[in-house]
Amino acid sequence: MAGGTRLASILLLSVFLFVRAQDDIREPPKILEPQSAKELFYDGNVDVTLPCRASGQPAPLYVWYWNGAPIESTNQAITYDPSNGSLTINGLTTREEGFYNCRAKNTFTNGMSAVAISHKTEVRRARIEPWDKDQDRTKTATEGNYVSIRCSDTLPKYYGPTTFKWYTVEGEDDLIEVEEDDRVFIDNKGTLHFTYVLRTDEQSNRYYSCAMSNVVEGKITLGGRTRLVVQKSDSIAEVKPALQFSTKLAGDGALTFKRNTEGHLECFFSGYVNDPGNEVPTIEWQDNAGNTIVSGTDSYTIESHGRVLKIASLVEADEKPYTCNARNRIGTAEGRMTLNVTSSPIWVKPLQSTTVPQGKDAVFHCEARSAAGEVPPDPPRWFKNGQRLDVSYDPNKFAFANEKRELRVKSAQKNTDIACFQCYVGNSVGEEFSDGCLNVILPIVITTKPPAVQTIEKGDIVNLTVVATADKLYPVAYKWQFNDITYERVSAPPHVIYDVNANLAYINTSDLTDQQMRDIRGVYRCEIYDEFETVLVDVKVRLKGDPVVIPVAEAGSGFWIIGLILGVILIALILIIVCCAVCRRKMQEGDYRVGRKETAAGLDPEKEIKDNEFKDLAKTGYDLTIKKRSAAFGFDTIPIIAEDDNESFGSEYGEEAMAFNEDGSFIGKYSQGKKL
Ligand SMILES: *[C@@H]1O[C@H](CO)[C@@H](O)[C@H](O)[C@H]1NC(C)=O
Ligand SMILES: *[C@@H]1O[C@H](CO)[C@@H](O)[C@H](O)[C@H]1NC(C)=O
Ligand SMILES: *[C@@H]1O[C@H](CO)[C@@H](O)[C@H](O)[C@H]1NC(C)=O
């Protein structure tokens, strides 16, 4: 006996400790920086700092990963501070290049932890790799004709924004840049074009040399050299425009751009007329509807004497045909091309952090699509705190739906289920990543609640004190409703003494007049809410000796009572009929009593069967009646109890509803309120 008591108290204590243990504020990490995937280029030997910042309670600690593996503390070139999240590459060389991402992890008092993962940052040393230069070449042209000089058969690999330039060179270090003008153009493949070449372009003794210029590094790398020989012509013939180069002719790849990047379309025409100032054809761009594109409108920019159309931050709708039209005095020409806007998966619903009250399900979405007209992404891959989730998981806790695009965490518990989830979606163009955490908070629990019905007389105290507890992360707020008026914050219905700090609410009726006494009658509704939940507590106040009034407006409810009574009578009738039927049958099977005795003794199996048959029949009849009864009576009581997931509510309100059966209006209102 004493042992039992001890066990019980230990159990009680552990329940108490369990409740206390998770009473702390818990918030999974949320990565604030970096917010998106990045590609960063740095000059060689600079110190690179990558920040990682996350919120969370308790404050998270950070671990940096480099090309998928945690960075060892023994690594001297790459160091980071686990408590502030900042990573430093001490003097960047090509060795430290790669993909960096950080993980923010916080550990709760119960030892569980949540791990959020950042987007990846690609770090590169901006550079142009050594160039396998072609042999010196010679290009021969006739004055007045179109001529182009290719940059190189093979271009070196390069990292970081890089542009093509052309120089004329003599010796090692005599370089003169070839400037673009209305006659000269460098396309985005590096080729140098002359609309019509002149004798002066020959640049005797000098070579033409293509160069690549790295913007970050601020260095140029020269490619192979070409000697240009221009044969003299007596007079330059007038020619109408002809398309010599366009991004379409440069190959399909040149017309494919990723969404949100800059689209770049080029056309180059030859042509000449002997009209000083207008020798070169003019170029105009049109969209697929035949509208002329004006530079500076929408996201369009036209550059390089009309040869380049740039479209800032491409959207899928930019995937359409474009036309460049060239014109001079003696003719026209056109180039057509269709821009292809492609994309790694585009989020429809990325993972989003969510907070649920304990016991509720949490749902995460990972939905993405491909660019219009392209192959849809593969099903997402899921991770929990960085550990693969969709290969083995507890089906009682997690459920996937909609081809893995939805993850449900069932009946989330504060003690075990606070975690971060990651999902990856890929298509032929690339992969996208999304991170979202689940926080679970303690639900609102009413700890103090006044009697639901208070019948009072002058001098009584009407106790309206409602006290609730909830998760400390989201403290609850209270508001009152009385006679269709809502009282927020510190305000309260008339005559109610409301002390928000001491959590007291009551009416002292000692000094109220008779009229005031009549005015305080009614239903006081206390709404207890936080960001995620609302709980209602209703207190009905009536005066002693008040007659029970069924308002005319609520006549419908009165009829409902009559219906209920009729229903009860009907059920009674059915009961009687069933009873009669049972009795009749009993009488017909005269050996019933004997049979039962025999059954009990296990003597007559045949009779046993018959007997069972009979019992089953009687049982169903009985069940049926009960069901009908509860259907009729339960109309008001069932919704109230069923909606109650809070133990402190059930019985009291059930009783109260029965107690107010005569007052249909009140029951109706109350049930409605509970469903909110
Ligand atoms: C655009 O480019 C993507 C990626 O290379 C390719 O899958 C798609 O078929 C292209 N679309 C068109 C219309 O050419
Ligand atoms: C009202 O009731 C609560 C709990 O039922 C009690 O703690 C409180 O002291 C009461 N207040 C008054 C003014 O009677
Ligand atoms: C109610 O009001 C009367 C008269 O003002 C006062 O004597 C009494 O102490 C009050 N009761 C409470 C519980 O405040």
Image (cartoon, rainbow, N blue to C red):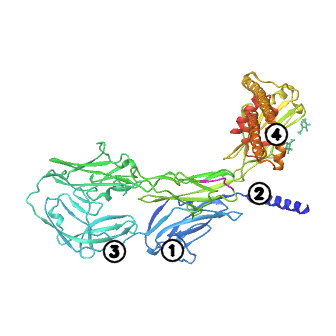
Which residue is labeled 4 in the image? 592
Badge 1 is on which residue? 90
**Which residue, given by chain and number where applicable, does mark 3 sit on?**
130
The disc, 4 or 1, on the residue closer to the chain's N-terminal end is 1
Q: Is 506 situated above or below 664?
A: below
Label 1 sits on a secondary structure element that is: loop
Q: Nearer the viewer, residue 376 or 625?
A: 625
Q: Give me the C-alpha separation between circle 2 and circle 1.
A: 48 Å
Left or right of 601, for residue 32: left
Amino acid at the residue labelled 2: Val
Magenta span covers which residues?
408-413
Q: Earlier in the sequence, mark 2 or mark 3?
A: 2
- Asked whether the viewer can see residue 335, the reply is yes
Q: Nearer the viewer, mark 3 or mark 1?
A: 3
Q: Check disc 1: other Cα within 10 Å, few if <14, some if 14-19, many if 20+.
A: some
Contact (Cβ within 8 Å) of mark 3 with mark 4? no
Earlier-in-chain disc, 4 versus 2: 2
User: Who comes first in sequence, dot 2 or dot 1?
Assistant: 2
Q: Nearer the viewer, mark 2 or mark 3?
A: 2
